[in-house]
Amino acid sequence: MDMETDQIHQIDVGNLLAFNPSHRFPSAPSSREELVKECVTEGTKLVQAIADTLFNFPSTETSDGPLVQLPRPTTKLPREKHLPRPKPPTKWEEFALKKGIQKRKKDKIVYDENTDQFKRRHGYDRVNDDNDIPIIEAKASDEPGEDPFAKRLDDKKKRVGKQEKNRLQNLKTAAKAGALPSHVQLAVTALPISGTKTQPQKIGKDALGDVAGLAATSTASGGKFDKKLPGEKPPKKQGKHHKYLPVLPHRGKVDEEKEQTNKVLSKLLSKHSHEILNVGKAINMYNDKKEKKKSGRSDKLKAKKDITKKKPYANKAQ
Amino acid sequence: MMEIRTPKTHKAKRVLEKRAPKLVENGKKTLILHGTKTSATVSSVLMELYRLKKGGAIKYSRRNENIRPFESGGETSLEFFSLKTDCSIFVYGSHSKKRPDNLVLGRMYDHHVYDLIEVGIENFKSLLSFSYDKKIAPHEGSKPFICFTGEGFENVQELKQLKEVLTDLFRGEVVENLNLTGLDRAYICTAVSPTKVFLTHCAIKLKKSGTIVPRIELVEVGPSMDLVIRRNRLPNEGLRKEAMKLSKDKPKKKVKNVDQDDVLGKLGRVYIPEQEVGKIPLPDKSKGVKRERREGKVKKNKEEGSASKKLKESE
């Protein structure tokens, strides 16, 4: 009886699915309730058929209840995403394959000959650390004046840069084949501009602030009453920046104004003042001034001095 | 200029790995949304569908005016949502004069529309209108039985597609082990005519029978509705073949520190770090935490309670 019903109903235990293809309504169901009742009874039969097979599976007892191992579902349903595509080999992998180079597992702890100790390969206090080298012996091919330590750092930077470039190339080929690793994303940071090689500069925070300041000053009130956004800094002081030194010296502090003038004076009167002072320029300036005075400025602009009027003598009363 | 971007946190990395294409896939998530206008029936159908699929469904509450699944340009928004929420099935409800109480069920492959089927809802009965014993109410997220009855599901192409879509929708996760006490719901779909399907959701009552297999009784609990087939779109052959490709079984990864012994069974190895006796955290000896204090308090409250009772009695 069970075998017959199994053959009549198509059962997929993996999905808990049952299908009865041989049912048809003999006549139009008389009422809604009749229809519903018939559907539920048919459904009950199907569920019973699935349960028959399910409860006869070997079950393991657990604290929550009997656990049964389901077979794989038999109905074919479309996948959600494509099958993962195989990764194309990287440049190094191709090279290694060609040359027959085998991968060798590296140990975490390596014996350091300099200190006769076992040290780790990477990380704090590692073997062959670049920073630990105290002395680099000069070779005949070395140029004088070249810093070998800086050269080592430079070489390392170049190596790292080359590696990054190669890594990017490998990822690009993988992305082309549709096999980019799931945690990596390639982002385009700038559009390729044909013609010029210079990349468009990213505007920084300060530049933006300056531009905003410029726009503000073009307003009628000079940007003083503009509403500021939260987080926007107040405008920088426009115009000349004067640093006024204190008139009276602070306790224990040097008189700064005096110091300033002394400095200038010492420079002028020093032995090498001719090096500081650009004599040629000074002469030119002096001559220009003189010529201007001689040629006389346009009298229309200057107020004429009335020689008939007498100046009151302020000090004569004494 | 290209830049390599990798996730900076472990959580972000795990999310990306979860969403990546795999050999054995996760369960499909459902996206439930509605269009420009919805009637009361459609909104309640969508809400109840969401409740039935809680845990594997995402419901959007705003209306989406630019989604028209059957038009060529109207799917871009859907594909975008599918990408963002990682959902591969969507249910789109709408209502118009030409298509009253409309429901579009669709599936995605690689976040592009794979196939669509449009049904109309008739004779909808909400799950609130069913009265039943609350003890048999199905639990959230339990694996359902799915039953199809009727020759229409084999002969009519649209019904065949509907059968596949409904299986995908109600299936949930594919599991290896199933707890037999957790079987409490069933979806019954009957082909009433070549264009009409009656769908209902029932709870399962297991009754004692002579054998190990219990006797099944179904009680209607959930929403029930009639689905009338309207339009549909089948996937094109190439896409269908690609989506149905089966993956070859990968050999199971070796689990570390676990051995199988013929006599003793499954053996495991546990590595315990060296115990530094001087650094063991000492017990909390603060006054309020001591057991004697707590018990004393409980006793005191009891005595007080009984004392007040005595007073009352004496009065």
Image (spheres, grey):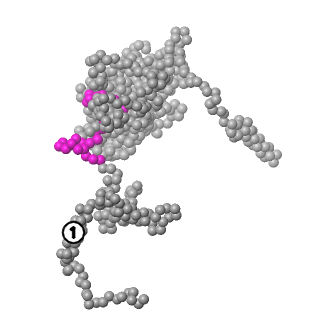
The image quadrant that residue B109 belongs to is: top left
- Could you say whether the residue bearing mark 1 is in a helix, strand or loop? helix
Name the subunit of mark 1: A
Q: Is residue A193 magenta?
A: yes
Q: Position of residue A301 (x, y in %)?
A: 22, 79
Determine the residue positioned at 39% across, 17% down.
Answer: B251
Q: Quadrant of the N terminus of chain B?
A: top left
Residue type at mark 1 is: Asp
Q: Position of A167 compared to B18: left or right? A: left
User: Which quarter of the figure has residue A187?
Assistant: top left
- State the residue in front, A81 or A110: A110
Residue A187 shows in this picture: yes
Image coordinates for residue B234, horizontal then vertical, percent: 26, 30
What segment is highlighted magenta in the picture? Answer: A173-202
The verdict on residue A57 being magenta is: no
Q: Nearer the viewer, residue A295 or A232?
A: A295
Near-viewer residue (A162 or B269): A162
Q: Residue furthest top?
A: B263
Disc 1 crowd, CA 10 A, few/some/many (<14, 14-19, 20+) = few
Between B213 and A39, the one lying in front of the other is: B213
Secondary structure character of the magenta stretch overall: loop
What residue do we see at 39% from left, 65% from top? A261
In the image, B203: left or right of B273?
left
Image position of B250 with respect to B229: above or below: above
Q: Which residue is mark 1?
A: A288
